[in-house]
Amino acid sequence: MRVTNRLFARGGAIALAAFMMVGGAAFADTSSVGIDPTGVLSANRASATLTGTAVCTAGDTATLTVHIYQSVGRLINIGIGDVSPFTCSGNSGTWSAVVNAIPGLTFQPGPATVVVRSVTTVTTTTIVTNPDGSTTTATITTPTGDSEFGGVVNLRPFHK
């Protein structure tokens, strides 16, 4: 029975690794997302601040969702955070996210797996002529990319 439990625990890690290797959509506008190798834990370890870089097509808007997965004993601590949408310039831009642990869990100092999902959109404004001759302005937001990037981050305790 003990061997089965160990294999199951390893199987979960293998499944997560396979997900990260296959992650990514059929089309992607964000050409790269960088994840800085060190994250900073909050004083109560209920959240971690992660930073990095992203490159996307000029004129698009990018939204990043950041997930942390950290194995601690038999538990997997999970956290989710968002990066406010930012306008892409075509050059490398920086991002920062506060990733909150699921209530009841806390992150530990040490290594964690990070998955960043990038969704990009472009917004266009069109003037539409109505049958009565009046005009209406229509704003259309179109998705241009959806991709995932993964990495390892070392979570460090907060120091004043």
Image (cartoon, rainbow, N blue to C red):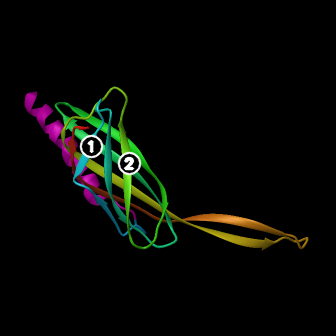
Tell me the number on the disc at residue 40: 1
Compared with 71, 119 (above or below) is: below
How far from the left and from the top, in percent, is residue 120?
48, 63
Q: Quadrant of residue 57?
A: bottom left
Compared with 154, 135 (above or below) is: below
Badge count: 2
* Residue toward you, 13 or 96: 96
Question: Which residue shows up at 26% across the image and 35% down it?
Answer: 107
Report if residue 27 is visible in the image.
no
Which range is magenta?
Answer: 1-25
Reply yes or no: does residue 10 show up in magenta.
Answer: yes
Q: State left or right for residue 72 relative to residue 81.
A: left
Compared with 86, 48 (above or below) is: above
In the rendered image, which residue does mark 2 sit on? 97
* Residue toward you, 155 or 119: 155
Circle 2 packing at 10 Å, graded few (<14), some (14-19), many (20+), is many
Secondary structure beneath label 1: strand
How far from the left and from the top, in percent, is residue 2?
9, 28
Q: State left or right for residue 38 relative to residue 95.
A: left
Report if residue 3 is visible in the image.
yes
